[in-house]
Image (cartoon, helix red, strand yellow):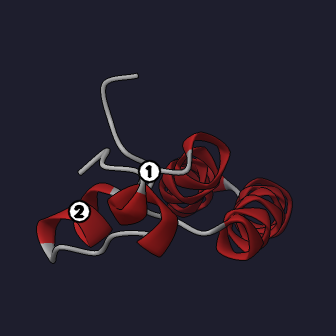
């Protein structure tokens, strides 16, 4: 693995659910160019939930406690 997960499991689930809901709302409700922009942004949120890694959290130094204990950091 090339990255260390920095998003806890409960937050990963919320990100996937919120991302999928925002994709649906962007495409079904908004439509057009703005709907596509919202859906693309929401895909990034859902992707960070699926992979368990958030680049913005990594920039500010967020780490999971169990990863630090295992010496992965």
Mark 1: secondary structure = loop
Q: Residue at x 30, y 49 (%)?
A: 71
Crowd band around label 2 with a 10 angstrom C-alpha radius: few (<14), some (14–19), many (20+): some
Between the C-alphas of marks 2 and 1, the distance is 8 Å
Of 64 and 51, which appears nearest the observer? 64
Quarter where residue 16 is shown:
bottom right
- Give percent across and percent down for residue 22: 73, 67
Quadrant (top left, top right, bottom left, bottom right) of the N terminus: top left
Residue 7's spot in the image, x, y percent?
A: 52, 65
Secondary structure of residue under mark 2: helix
Cβ atoms at labels 2 and 1 below 8 Å apart = yes
Residue drawn at the location 83% of the way across and 58% of the way down: 24
Q: Which residue is mark 1?
A: 53
In this picture, residue 14 sits left or right of residue 1: right
35, above or below 29, in the image: above
Q: How many marks?
A: 2
**Looking at the rendered structure, which numbered label has been put on residue 58?**
2
Q: Residue 58, image x and y in percent?
A: 23, 62
């Amino acid at each position: 693995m090339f990255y260390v997960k920095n998003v806890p499991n409960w937050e990963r689930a919320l990100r996937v659910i919120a991302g999928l809901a925002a994709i649906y709302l962007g495409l079904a409700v908004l439509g057009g160019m703005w709907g596509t922009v919202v859906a693309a942004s929401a895909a990034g949120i859902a992707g960070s939930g699926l992979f368990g890694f958030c680049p913005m959290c990594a920039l500010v130094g967020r780490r999971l406690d169990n990863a630090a204990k295992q010496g992965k950091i």
